[in-house]
Image (cartoon, grey):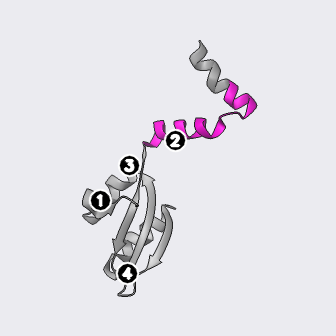
Amino acid sequence: MLGFALPLLALATGAGLPALIEAIRTRVIGRPVAGQLDLGPEHSRIRAKLFSWHAVRREQERPAGGWTIDVELSARRWRELSQLEGLNSDSMRQKA
């Protein structure tokens, strides 16, 4: 019974609401995947898709062309992008 009371209390009072929202988000779409991608000009389609998904947190143009992009997206979206665009786990590095 107490397991149901805590989420209801959070909803009623607003206390702990951010944690509740994050717990629901994680349950529904999975844990977020975050890191940096180095994309060349030939990867403009990947860049556009990340922006359309609102996954870009920061972008920096590289002097030689292309971008370094900080991203955060669901694990499901990362799998989709990886399959469609031929990316793998080595394509994204963890932010330092």
Say which residue label 3 marks.
75
Given the image, on which type of amino acid does mark 1 rest? Answer: Ser
Image position, residue 20 (x, y; %)? 59, 35
Q: Label 4: few (<14), some or many (≥20) within 10 Å?
A: some
- Give the left or right position of residue 30, taking residue 87 as reference: right
Which one is in front, 84 or 70? Answer: 70
- Rounded to the nearest angstrom, the CA distance separating label 1 from label 2 is 21 Å
Q: Earlier in the sequence, mark 2 or mark 3?
A: 2
The image quarter in which residue 38 lies: bottom left
Q: Return the disc, 4 or 3, that comes first in the chain's sequence.
A: 4
- In the displayed structure, 82 sits above or below 24; it is below
Q: Look at 55% across and 40% down and name the residue there.
A: 22
Mark 2: which secondary structure? helix
Question: Could you tell me how far apart the alpha carbons at marks 2 and 4 are, in whole angstroms?
Answer: 32 Å
Residue at image x 74%, y 29%?
12
Residue 52 marker: none
